[in-house]
Amino acid sequence: SQQGEEDPQALSIQEGENATMNCSYKTSINNLQWYRQNSGRGLVHLILIRSNEREKHSGRLRVTLDTSKKSSSLLITASRAADTASYFCATGANSKLTFGKGITLSVRP
Amino acid sequence: GAVVSQHPSWVICKSGTSVKIECRSLDFQATTMFWYRQFPKQSLMLMATSNEGSKATYEQGVEKDKFLINHASLTLSTLTVTSAHPEDSSFYICSAAGSSSYEQYFGPGTRLTVT
């Protein structure tokens, strides 16, 4: 069964703007990961945040995790047209990943 | 970084035939490999987890006799869709994990179309 639930389901922004995507989950986790998928392609790992971490940065990406609210957010700063893709959060527990439904991000040039 | 390949990248087969999909970890030893399927515009659903040298563990609702998984070495796992039907048409993605990593490395996926 799916655990992560992202919102919004779709997001359209102008190049240069920031994109914020949220993910909520229901049960205990070891870590939470964000992935990107370009249409018809495999997944690219973006960032992993462990359950004892609150914030993590990687380049233009910033991820936060609030275990008390069982939620995470992914911020992409200064978006580019190449960031257009589907983004999934996945919760990790017992070596398994459970994926959310995904967010479709469109960045208009 | 860790690279996982899948072969073939796409396959079209006739109903009733069997199709084998390979998943290889190219530059690391994968203790565990995972198989997912993804329908259009939907999320990835875990089908099964396989550990090298042991039987795969299937998720609830996944028919183990239909989706045969073999993980014979630390770099290769195969998924065989037996007696494929049109409803098996989907995007199948594998991932691989090392023994000490939470992170899964995903293959590029295989698009199966059953006619």
Image (spheres, rainbow, N blue to C red):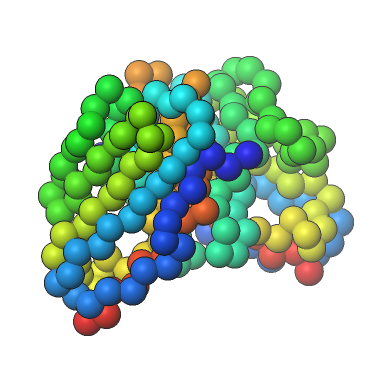
Tell me which residue sits at (19%, 50%) in the image.
Answer: A61
Tell me which residue sits at (79%, 46%) in the image.
Answer: B82
User: Is residue A96 shown left or right of residue A56?
Assistant: right
Query: Toward which corner of the image does residue B97 lie, by quadrant?
Result: top left
Residue that lies at the very extreme toward the front in this rendered image: A69
Query: Toward which corner of the image does residue A2 lie, by quadrant?
Result: top right
User: Is residue A78 shown left or right of residue A26?
Assistant: left
User: Is residue A28 shown left or right of residue B70?
Assistant: left
Position in image of residue A94 (x %, y %): 50, 21
Quarter the C terminus of chain B occupies: bottom right
Tell me which residue sits at (61%, 49%) in the image.
Answer: B37
Position in image of residue A23 (x %, y %): 40, 47
User: Is residue A24 shown left or right of residue B66?
Assistant: left
Image: B50 above or below A38: above
Quarter the N terminus of chain B occupies: top left
Position in image of residue B43 (x %, y %): 55, 53
Number of marks in picture? 0
Residue sitting nearer the eye, A58 or A9: A9
